[in-house]
Image: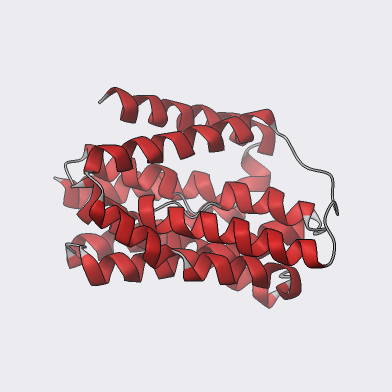
Amino acid sequence: MILFLAPLIFLLVSFVFSMLGMGGSQLYIPILFWLGMDFKTEAIPLGLLLNVVASTSAAVTYIRNRLVDWKVALPFAVGMLAMPPVGTWANVSLPTRPVILIFAAFTTLAAILTLSGWKPKEGLLRGRRRVVLGLVAGGVLGFLTGLIGRGGGSFVVPLLIMAGLPAKVAAASSAVIVTGSGLSGFLSHLATQARPDLLLWLLCAVAVLLGSQAGSRLMAKKMKSSAVRYVFGAILLLVAVLLVAM
């Protein structure tokens, strides 16, 4: 059942999330959990893989169009690449329920940030402060990537804007950073406790790739970005409530 249902669901999810410039692990992991997969050893590793597939698709486009500001993004990338293995170690040590509650709390924060439409003033931080912000914030988000399988794109973009990047460049740079941290987290889980179902992983990955490509090309013509943002935020709040209630 899951072999056919999951790819169809993720085709739709990746289509919508690509409109927001995000990978989609916020929904991949809970959906896999509700479809019967173990949260820590099956849902998180596959969710990270699918997030990497979706974000890589966007990142390649951004790099080709020279939209990535490597100088500002590099400190974030260092922190987010280094810390996922530490988060994975904590994931292995913790029982499943606390991991689910942390995931729900992080999802709630992302939903509030999305629904509020808050954006920091551009260029609040300069020089060394950028480096400190990138290493510290990137490290925290990288740890959470390994712990709960969340790439943190909804938090990276505002932080990059604070570091002085225009919104468009911040989104492009975030896609590259999240791809790296997601890959680091996925490999950490794969090496420790992941239980892969190769056929299911392949089918879901293909569905996410197709959905993200279609959504990114049709977004401007089919739906206003504000409407997508409100739908996205409401869905995240619902997911968080259901995870806590279960």
The N terminus, quarter of image? top left
Q: Is residue 234 left or right of residue 2?
A: right
Residue 49, relative to residue 40: is it above or below?
below
Quadrant of the rendered image containing residue 97: top left
Q: State the image coordinates of residue 147 (x, y, percent, origin top left).
A: 37, 53
Q: Residue 156 or 207: which is nearer the viewer? A: 156
Image quadrant of residue 73? bottom right
Residue shown at 32%/55% (left/top)? 90
- Horizontal and vertical percent for residue 12? 41, 44
- Note whether 190 is above or below 47 in the view shown: below
Q: Is residue 43 left or right of residue 128?
A: left
Give the residue furthest to the left.
1
- The residue at 61%/48% (across/down) is 155
Q: How many marks?
A: 0
Q: Could you say where residue 42 lies in the image, as x and y percent from the top left? A: 22, 54
Tell me which colouring the rendered structure shows.
secondary structure
Q: Is residue 191 visible?
A: yes
- Please indicate whether residue 229 sits to the left or right of residue 130 in the image: left
Q: Identify the image quadrant of the C terminus.
A: top left
* Residue at x 47%, y 33% (from the top left corner): 236
- At a point 30% along the width and 54% down the height, the residue shown is 91
Is residue 232 in view? Answer: no
Q: Position of residue 183 (x, y in %)?
A: 42, 69
Q: Nearer the viewer, residue 72 or 213?
A: 72
